[in-house]
Image (tube, grey):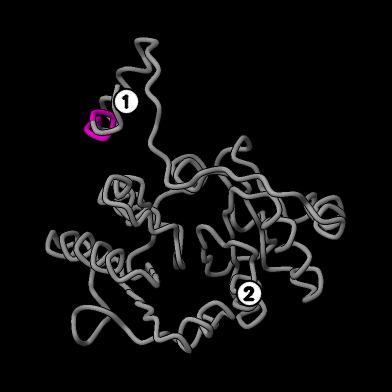
Amino acid sequence: MTDEKQATYTQANLAEAQEKGRYIRKIRSFVKREGRLTKGQEAALQRSWPLMGLTHEAGVVNFNECFGREADTIVEIGFGMGHSLVAMAAAAPEKNFIGIEVHRPGVGACLMAAEAQQLTNLRLYEHDAVEVFDDCFVDNSLAGVQVFFPDPWHKKRHHKRRLIQPEFVETLRKKLRIGGVLHLATDWQNYAEHMLEVMQAAEAAGHWQNLSPTNDYVPRPEERPLTKFERRGERLGHGVWDLKFARKA
């Protein structure tokens, strides 16, 4: 079966095939690249994962039990090495933050940074975000979801691998509470245009409200830290596009 034919399968098709014992390879938005753990990252994983780690296998997570309090919960998908996620969690101790990343060195680096900041409001998954959202978060439970600089899959034949697609956006909508905000950012203009097109279609269906006064992109919000990569891009004249949509229904 070609990737093009796989892309035509809906969730219903997939579920039906699995019930009949047939295996269909899911199209993923990432390629697992296992870099080497540094000694510091490995040590941080051993020390802090028992306290800060969450597992997909554990199923639905109760945020109040997980964090020991009731607070708004923000989820970041694909946090990389965790610099922005840790900075945001440190700047907003009144909120809970959950990061999802598939690359183990990034998880280790994030734990190192969280230890340095002595954070208590951060938890991490090392797993596929699509599966975590499907199986671990209850509907109407999140105050925000953020996806910063996801893999742009810039070649046209790979566009089907992009994370921000109508089906996944619908999943995010269900997990956000009414008024909850989806914040997207990319430095690839084509992906920004793709994101905007997907979100505007969902907005036209009555599900979202674009928080941009010009009905397209927003200036970088103060709460999203400016990364070293982004600063370098600005010096080279590269653009960055932020989108913020609130769940309306």
State which tag comes first along the sequence, 1 or 2: 1
**Residue at mark 2:** 89
235 over 87 or under it: above or below: below
Q: Is 224 positioned to the left or the right of 10 in the image?
A: right
Q: Is 186 positioned to the left or the right of 247 in the image?
A: right
Secondary structure type for disc 2? helix
Find residue 18 and report its horizontal and vertical position in percent: 38, 18
The answer to which quarter of the image holds residue 177 is bottom left
Nearer to us in this view, 53 or 111: 111
172 over 19 or under it: above or below: below
Q: Is 173 positioned to the left or the right of 49 in the image?
A: left
Give the residue type that dot 2 points to: Ala
Find residue 219 and report its horizontal and vertical position in percent: 35, 87
Q: Comparing marks 1 and 2, which lies closer to the viewer? A: 1
User: What residue is rendered at 39% in x and 70% in y?
Assistant: 186
Find residue 126 and report its horizontal and vertical position in percent: 63, 47
Number of callouts:
2
Give the residue type that dot 1 points to: Leu
What main secondary structure does the magenta stretch of the protein show? Answer: loop
Q: Which residues are magenta?
A: 5-9
User: What residue is rendered at 24% in x and 68% in y?
Assistant: 193
Secondary structure type for disc 1? helix
**Residue at mark 1:** 14
Q: Residues within 10 Å of mark 2 (few under 14, many from 20)?
A: many
